[in-house]
Image (cartoon, rainbow, N blue to C red):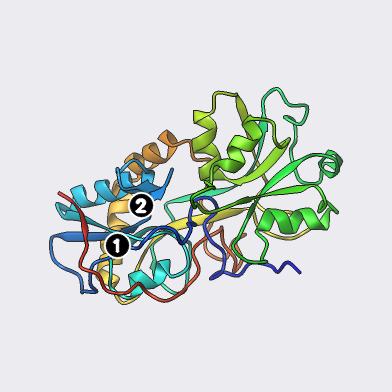
Amino acid sequence: MLRAPTLRSLALVASLTAGASVTAEAQRPSPLQPGILRVCNDPDNMPFSNQKGEGFENKLAELIASDWKAKLEYVWYPTRRGYFRILNGRYCDLIIQAPGGLDITGTTTPYYRSGYVLLTRRDSKLADLKSLADPRLKKARIGVTLLPSDEQLPPTMALSHYGVVGNLNGYLGWYDDEHRPEDIVNAVANDSVDVAIVWGPLAGYFAKQSKVPLKITPLADRDSVADVPFRYNIGMAVRRSEKELRDSLERTLKEKAPQIQAILKEYGIPMFPVTAAGGDDDDDGPPKPAAGPAPADTSRTARKD
């Protein structure tokens, strides 16, 4: 039986999840060091980050380091179970994306808000889909993202309330030797599915790269029937004890807001107005890494000089 996701068990769709095939490269735990900004990042998880520095998380990390005149160091670790534990274990000092209000870290004020979208080919008969309540979905081939467990992400939960369960095609939300998170976007482009329900940042980035014109239709803030949210605030995460660091981040996020928004738009991320705390969001968030044990000590550190 599929279970509903919890805050700690959701893994960032296609965006913030990864397979165990990637070996963690982390430095030894240490406290904050003046003049150095240590950022946790996934080594192969576009459009978020990679070791070539091509993701928008990389660009945001570079922007912050430049503003602080700090040396940027990356601690590479796949965005899967244990991701936030490497932050609290002092392997790094900053995670660029975290669900607003995540209780196991100290999160900043959200700097953007995104959500799940419907993704179709522009030439599809379903290109005019607006919501999951559309009766045509009962006969359509639907692509959904799977978690590495029997839990459901919000769109799949909502579909079950509409009786749409037997025509779903699952795509892994993490990478391994055979699968990529963008497979769900490619499935729409090559007509393997009629429509996919995808986390916005992933859909926006890879839809822009598709040779086949694709259409993105944002889902509403919340599904009225299933009563699950589809949009979420995203902030940055530091350790809860590092209040001075968080305050510095808050100032930078405010002062550099135009540049930050420009970077996010460049990557095609669907964005919506950030909501106040206690608004439409509930205890669940977008797919994100679950809590877990920190990696063993290693001496390998990736630096960006």
Picture quadrant where residue 39 is located: bottom left
Query: Residue farthest to the front?
Result: 177
Which residue type does callout 1 highlight?
Glu
Can you see residue 239? no
116 with respect to 84 (left or right): right
- Neighbor class of circle 1 (other Cα within 10 Å; few <14, some 14-19, many 20+) is many
Regarding mark 1 in the picture, which secondary structure is present there? loop
Q: Which mark is residue 92?
A: none
Along the line of sight, which residue is nearer the eye, 303 or 96?
303
Residue type at mark 2 is: Pro
Q: Is 35 on the left or on the right of 171, as rendered?
A: left
**Can you give x and y, in whole percent of width and height, for residue 288 in the image?**
51, 61
- The residue at the point 21 percent across, 52 percent down is 65
The residue labelled by disc 2 is 43
Res. 237 in view: yes
Q: Report the front residue among 266 and 73.
A: 73
Residue under the image location 44 percent in, 36 percent down: 265
Taking the spot 51% from the left edge, 44% from the top edge, the residue there is 201
Along the polypeptide, which appears first: circle 1 or circle 2? 1
Quote the CA–CA distance across marks 1 and 2. 9 Å
Q: Quadrant of the N terminus?
A: bottom right
Residues packed near mark 2 inside 10 Å, few (<14), some (14 to 19) or many (20 plus): many
Residue that mark 1 sits on: 25
Q: How many badges with numbers are in the image?
A: 2
* Mark 1 in CB contact with mark 2 (< 8 angstroms): yes
Residue at position x 68%, y 67% in the image: 4
Where residue 132 sits in the image (x, y, percent)? 76, 46
152 left or right of 272?
Answer: right
Residue 226 drawn at (x, y percent): 77, 59
Front residue of this view, candidates 227 and 135? 135
Q: Can you give x and y, in whole percent of width and height, for residue 153 in the image?
A: 65, 59
Quarter location, residue 222: bottom right
